[in-house]
């Protein structure tokens, strides 16, 4: 299972590195274009073979494609490049430049002066993120006597300073890390690749002591170390771990006992959220424990909420839970243990209500349809100044 499906972001970056990084895809609207847009984001969805579906490994793939469709439907021609394209030089005038944080600073000075530059922010600010990540690594070193690296470090960039305005996927937590710049920021709620029907066969009395950690690489960053230590000391509770452990072998070695030798911890590895296996895990899981230190939208937590899993999250997960589950006061191991015990002792009827609330909150705020509608509203009302 560990090798069945690689960590989504790594796979996407590897595909881009194999030759797509420096390509440009030019898209035309129906009729005469009213202007031109340069989109610097995920290029892979625009390089699909005929009949090939957009990958659901990561929300960014579909979101990049949808952002381009929004401008096409508004009558604009769209040139798409990879956010990793460090060699692109604009050869024409653009009305709008929409860019992930990595390319904006590099390309913006080469654009016509009246081009409106929009930063598409999918992480917390790099200073906040990296400081929080180093703090977690230092805490681990002091707690366990091991030094690990972090796969979630963000490159230094001045995207918010260079941009005229920004869109952001996360909630107020993520937005607050950029407010110092005094730029207009518009929230576009992150989408999810899969939604799920309510599981009427889920037995909350039977799964009340079962929990999940589900995330991508950056395990210390996302609190897996703390969750493992918390559950290793609570043998009466079960933990399932779903994440690409083969991407961080040093972490797997440091936590080998907890991951592979602790009876109440089941290590699955990475898993496809559209698979029957994930649905089976969701049916037998009460809550998600996700004490991450910095996120740009908490997509893995929102996916679990869609599946009726109750969230126990840090504030830095950047997810509005609608009152379902709990936002941890801090991410200390005793706090995690207390939240788990408190949730598991609730009556089954309360647990079902909480699970339904988590699912309804996710469905009401985070779907592809909602992302498309919110991005269209941003383009029509903010960028184009129309009535929307």
Image (cartoon, rainbow, N blue to C red):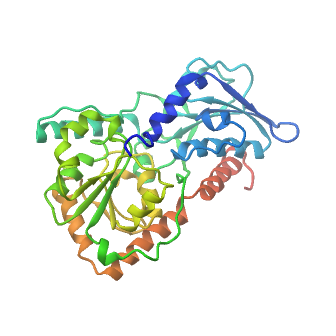
Using the rendered view, name the quadrant where residue 34 is placed: top right
Q: Is residue 205 above or below residue 18?
A: below
Query: Residue 92 in the image: x percent, y percent?
Result: 74, 22
Picture coordinates of residue 233 (x, y %)? 13, 57
Q: Position of residue 276 (x, y in %)?
A: 47, 59
190 left or right of 310? right
Left or right of 95, for residue 146: left
Which one is in front, 296 or 243?
243
**In the rendered view, does 105 fall on the left or right side of 155?**
right
Query: What residue occupies the far right of the structure in this picture?
Result: 31
Q: Residue at x 34, y 79 (%)?
A: 350
Determine whether, in the image, residue 188 is placed left or right of residue 339: right
Identified at 65% across, 46% down, the residue is 66
Is residue 105 shown to the viewer in this render? no
Eyeballing the image, is 326 above or below 244?
A: below
Taking the spot 24% from the left edge, 65% from the top edge, the residue there is: 340
Q: Position of residue 181 (x, y in %)?
A: 46, 37
């Amino acid at each position: 299972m560990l090798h069945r499906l690689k960590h989504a972001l790594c796979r996407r970056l590897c595909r881009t590195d194999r030759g797509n990084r420096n390509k440009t895809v030019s898209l035309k609207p129906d009729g005469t274009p009213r202007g031109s847009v340069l989109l610097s984001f995920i290029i892979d969805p625009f390089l699909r073979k005929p009949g090939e579906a957009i990958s659901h490994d990561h929300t960014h793939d579909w979101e990049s494609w949808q952002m381009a469709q929004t401008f096409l439907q508004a009558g604009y021609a769209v040139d798409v490049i990879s956010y990793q394209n460090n060699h692109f030089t604009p050869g024409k005038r653009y009305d709008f430049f929409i860019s992930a944080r990595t390319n904006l600073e590099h390309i913006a000075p080469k654009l016509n002066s009246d081009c409106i530059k929009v930063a598409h922010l999918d992480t917390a600010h790099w200073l906040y993120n990296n400081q929080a990540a180093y703090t977690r690594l230092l805490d681990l070193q002091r707690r366990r006597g091991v030094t690990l690296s972090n796969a979630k470090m963000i490159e230094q960039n001045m995207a918010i300073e260079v941009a005229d305005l920004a869109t952001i996927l996360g909630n107020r937590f993520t937005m607050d890390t950029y407010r110092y710049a005094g730029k207009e920021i518009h929230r576009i709620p992150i989408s999810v690749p899969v939604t799920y029907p309510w599981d009427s066969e889920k037995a909350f009395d039977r799964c009340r002591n079962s929990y999940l950690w589900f995330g991508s690489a950056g395990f210390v960053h996302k609190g897996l170390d703390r969750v493992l230590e918390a559950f290793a000391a609570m043998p009466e509770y079960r933990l399932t771990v779903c994440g690409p452990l083969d991407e961080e072998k040093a972490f797997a070695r440091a936590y080998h006992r907890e991951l592979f030798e602790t009876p109440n911890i089941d290590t699955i590895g990475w898993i496809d959220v559209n698979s029957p296996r994930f649905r089976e895990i969701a049916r037998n899981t009460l809550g998600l424990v996700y004490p991450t230190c910095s996120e740009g939208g908490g997509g893995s937590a929102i996916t679990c909420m869609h599946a009726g899993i109750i969230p126990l999250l840090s504030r830095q997960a950047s997810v509005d839970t609608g009152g379902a589950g709990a936002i941890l006061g801090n991410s200390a191991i005793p706090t995690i243990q207390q939240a788990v015990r408190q949730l598991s002792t609730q009556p089954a009827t309360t647990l079902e209500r909480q699970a339904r609330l988590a699912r309804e909150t996710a469905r009401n705020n985070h779907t592809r349809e909602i992302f498309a509608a919110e991005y269209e509203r941003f383009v029509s009302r903010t960028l184009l100044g129309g009535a929307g």
